[in-house]
Amino acid sequence: ELSEKTIQTVKSTVPVLAEHGEAITTHFYQRLLSDHPELKNIFNMTNQMAGRQPRALANAVYAAAQYIDNLSAIEPVLNQIAEKHRSLNVKPEHYPIVGEYLLLAIKEVLGEAATDEVIEAWGEAYGAIAHTFIKVEQEKYQNTSTQEGGWIGYRNFKVIKKVKESDVITSFYLESEDRQSISSFSPGQYITIKATIPGSEYTHLRQYSLSGAPGKSYYRISVKREDGENGQPAGIVSSFLHQQLQEGDVLPITAPAGDFSLNNESSAPVVLISGGVGLTPMLSMLMNMVDQGSERDIYFIHASHNGRVHAFKDDVDQVEKQVSSVQTKVLYSSPTDTDDGYDKHGHIDLDWLKSTVPHDAEFYFCGPEGFMRAVNRSLKDWEVPEEKVRYEFFGPELSLN
Ligand code: HEM
């Protein structure tokens, strides 16, 4: 229990910290990782460099501090982070380490204002936030381990099939090396893979949405090769998976996680909207509904550059042919001469949505950041109720507003 004074002290310093948020956390990470290089095996070093992870963590800490006397008010946010942490195998003993460096950074930014009283208050507040995460995460580890086919931490899976789905996307079919049962999942969920890459000092963890329907003896992920454009380096993990990982190789993974999932309680029409490789969770949802013989009207909408990079075209076309309740629409932003069968509109906006899908549907979307902003904006302008809109970010969650 935090005292009223502690709560007030923390809340009153949140605005100052929020203002310097990224400076704090960027610095914090540099120190944390230089003093504890073993954590480089866990944190995504690419996101560190892009500053995305520091921003996500900073936002979460300030949000939590703002609600320090009522953390249940931000439960969905905490839950989403806890899912990610569970998937990454974050453990209680990590929290004091992170806390120590966060406090150091806060002290530095506040300068003279960082009296003993303020620092003590933040120490207590961090303790309370960490305690909440640890508790929620322990429950998740518990659930994961008691579930049929479930496990805690990393389990070795073998690549039983590697399939090229487009010029840039390749699927990996993963079967447990021990051939024992594997836990089911909700379509929309992801797994973490641990890649050991020749020539790289640390392991690399990455999340990939499961792209197939649940209920199989294997998991499937479908990975876009990040070639590195606009001055960005090529993706170290995606390049490894595409170029080096072969059938028969082993990949350690954690059990499926994530709060983005298909609402199976509802019979409302479903609109699945994806941009680029954001189609992977949507494909899982589509195939799951088809497997279940769902009677819902399903709209599968996919935006892509052109036919060369458009993955799973044949699979989705086939579903549309076989299942009368499924309609698909494809939009190409830069079609090539050989492309056909796509909507000439080129991109998704409000008018296009209005003319294509019903207003009373549930909407799910995933894709690049700009794409997601545009879709979110359109759905807001169309006054689709918030509870009917769900989305997934690849990478640290950013605000869409
Ligand atoms: C991801 C918050 C403690 C490791 C995240 C994200 C947030 C967050 C907001 C991004 C979630 C997303 O991807 O949507 C926090 C807060 C903490 C905390 C508020 C303390 C109260 C820890 C600890 C560890 C950890 C103790 C363990 C070393 C990670 C890792 C990621 C992550 C590895 C994935 C992103 C990346 O690799 O760059 N956390 N976290 N976090 N967190 Fe935490």
Image (cartoon, rainbow, N blue to C red):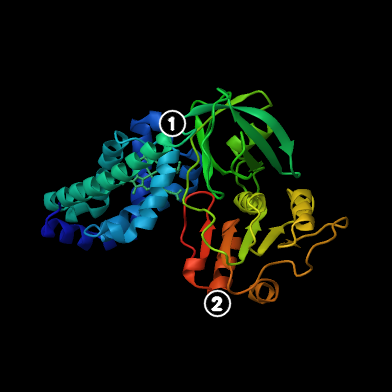
Amino acid type indicated by mark 2: Asp
Q: Residue at x 31, y 40 (%)?
A: 98
- Residue 235: x and y in percent read 60, 40
The image quarter in which residue 275 lies: bottom right
Of labels 2 and 1, the one closer to you = 1
Residue indicated by mark 2: 381
- Residue 212: x and y in percent read 64, 44
User: In the shown orientation, is residue 189 left or right of residue 65?
Assistant: right
- Determine whether the residue tagged by mark 1 lies in a helix, strand or loop: loop
Q: Is residue 365 above or below residue 180?
A: below
- Residue 31: x and y in percent read 34, 38
Question: Residue 64 versus residue 212: which sits nearer the camera?
Answer: 212
Quadrant hosting ligand 1: top left
Residue density around tag 2, few if under 14, some if 14–19, many if 20 or more, within 10 Å: few
Asked whether disc 2 touches disc 1, contact meaning CB atoms under 8 Å apart, the reply is no
**Do we see residue 289 in this rendering?**
yes
**Do we see residue 17 in this rendering?**
no
Residue indicated by mark 1: 153
Question: Residue 138 versus residue 46: which sits nearer the camera?
Answer: 138
Q: Residue at x 20, y 57 (%)?
A: 10
Question: Can you tell me whether the CB of the residue at mark 2 lies under 8 Å from the nearest atom of ligand 1?
Answer: no
Q: Residue at x 53, y 48 (%)?
A: 186
Amino acid type indicated by mark 1: Gly
User: In the shown orientation, is residue 43 left or right of residue 273?
Assistant: left
The image quarter in which residue 143 lies: top left
Residue density around tag 1, few if under 14, some if 14–19, many if 20 or more, within 10 Å: some
- Determine whether the residue tagged by mark 2 lies in a helix, strand or loop: helix
